[in-house]
Amino acid sequence: MSAEAFKPRRRRSGTASWHMSREAVTLSVPNVAQWDDKKCHDFMVEVRWGSLNTVSCPHCGTIGKHYWRPLQKRWKCAGCGSTFSVTSGTVFSHRKRPLQDILASMLMWVNSAAGQPALELKRHFNTTYNTAFTWQHKMREALVRGYNVGLVSGDIEMDGAHQSGWRAAEKRGKPQGSRAVEADVDVKELTATMLTQTGRSKARTWKSGDRSDPEYGGRLPKDRRILMTVRKRFGQRGKGACATRVAVGLLETAPVAEAVMKSFVAIPESYLNTDNSPAYTEAGKRFQEHRTVEHAKTLIGPNGENNNQAEELNWRYDRAEKGIYLNIEPKYMLDYAAEIAFRSDTRRLPNGQQLRLAMNVALNVGESMFWRGFTRGRHRAVELVHPLPLPSKASGPPKGRHPVAAVNGMVPR
Ligand SMILES: [Zn+2]
C-alpha cells in the first residue's frame, strides 16, 4: 500500500499518545489499597495543607504546629484548644468510612473520564447507594464552590446549549419515530402536513408562565435549561481550552449572558468568541473584540471565527448524560456541569495529579452545605441558576417521615 493510504483523516491532537503513555497514570487503585493508615493520612494532610506539620485549625484559623494526639488521630489546637482531624471542616467531615475508602473511591471517580455512575461505585465498595451517591455529590459540590469560581480573561469562548426537559409526558403512550412512507406518497406534501400538525399542537399547549425560545420562538418545556459555557483558549493551536466556567440559565438571553459574564469574565481585557445568538450582541461591544460565527452555515468562519471549544464542553456534557448519568435533574445540572468542566480542564494531567487537585478543592471549601443529612431529608432548597437561584423543593414524598401518615395527616409513628 502507498503512504497515501495511511494519511490521517484529521490533524492529530496527541490525545491517544498521551493516554497510552506511562506518564498519564501515576497512581492506581491497588496502590492506594496497599497504603496503611499513616500513608493515607499523610497524603490527605499534604493535599489539604501542603505540609505535614504546619496545619491550620478549622475552628479558629490558627496556622502552626498543633499538638498531635496519635491515639485519636486528631490535633489539639495551640490557639483555641479545640480538637480537629484531617477531614474536620471539609466536605468529608463526620465521615463514617476510613480515609482509604475515600481516597480509593475518589481515585476511581477521577479515573472515569466521562463520569461515573453511583451504582458502579456502590458495587466497587459494596456499600449503600446513598453512601456512593453522596460521596460523588460532595465532590461535585466542592467543584461548584471551589473550582467553578473566579474570573477568566484572554481569548474567551461562550455558548449556551439546550439541555434537559424532554417532552416525555407528551410522547408517553403514543407511537414515535418516522412512519413508513408508501411509494406513491409525495414526501414534500407529507412533511408539510406533519409540520402543520405539530404547529397546531404546539399552539394548543401554550400556558401562562411558559417560556419561549428567544431565537426560534418555540415553546420550551418546563424543565428546559441552558448550559452556559465560558472557556479560555490555551492560546496555542491544537492545545484546546485551559480554563472552564459553567453556569445554568433558564433562557439564552442577554440578561443571563450578562450575569454569567459578570461572574466569570474579566471583560475589558478579553476577546469574545460566540455564535451569532443575539444574547451576546450588546455585551460583546464591551470586549476588545467580538468575533461571531454563523452556526447555521458553518462551524468555522472565513477568518477562523469559531467557538468550538465551548461546543467541545457541550459534547462532553451530552456524552456524560447519554452514556453515564442518563437523566440529569435540572436542579443538579450545575453540579454535573462543574464535574464535566473539571474533567475537561484536567484532561492532560496524570491521574494522581487529578486526584490531588480534586481533593485539594474538596478539603478547602468548608463543610458540605448541600449533602450533609441528605438521606435524612435535608435537601438543597435552591436550584443554582443565573442570574438568581430558584427555590426548589425536594422531589418525591417528604423524607424522614412516614409517607402514608404524612398523606393522611396523622402523627407519624
Ligand atoms: Zn483553633
Image: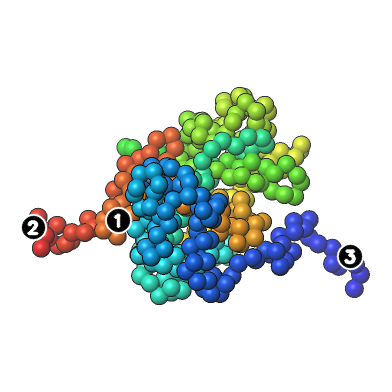
Residue 232 placement: quadrant = top right
Task: From the viewer's side, name the closer residue of 117 and 165.
Answer: 117
Q: Position of residue 333 (x, y in %)?
A: 44, 50
Q: Are marks 2 and 1 in contact (CB under 8 Å)?
A: no
Residue 207 at what x, y percent from top left?
Answer: 32, 40
> What residue would you read off at disc 2?
411
| Tag 3: amino acid | Glu
Q: Say left or right for 149 vs 375.
A: right
In the orientation shown, which residue stands out farthest toward the right?
Answer: 2
Q: Residue at x 34, y 49 (%)?
A: 82
Of pointers 2 and 3, the one earlier in the residue sequence: 3
Ligand 1's image quarter is top left
Residue to which mark 1 is pinned: 373
Q: Earlier in the sequence, mark 2 or mark 1?
A: 1
Residue that sits furthest to the left in the current view: 410
Q: Nearer the viewer, residue 116 or 218?
A: 116
Give the secondary structure at mark 2.
Answer: loop
Q: Give the x, y percent position of residue 326.
A: 46, 62
Spatial CA span between label 2 and label 3: 79 Å
Which amino acid is tagged 1? Answer: Gly
Residue 168 versus residue 129 in the image, above or below: above
Mark whose residue sits in front, 3 or 1: 1
> Residue at position x 52%, y 61% from top?
42
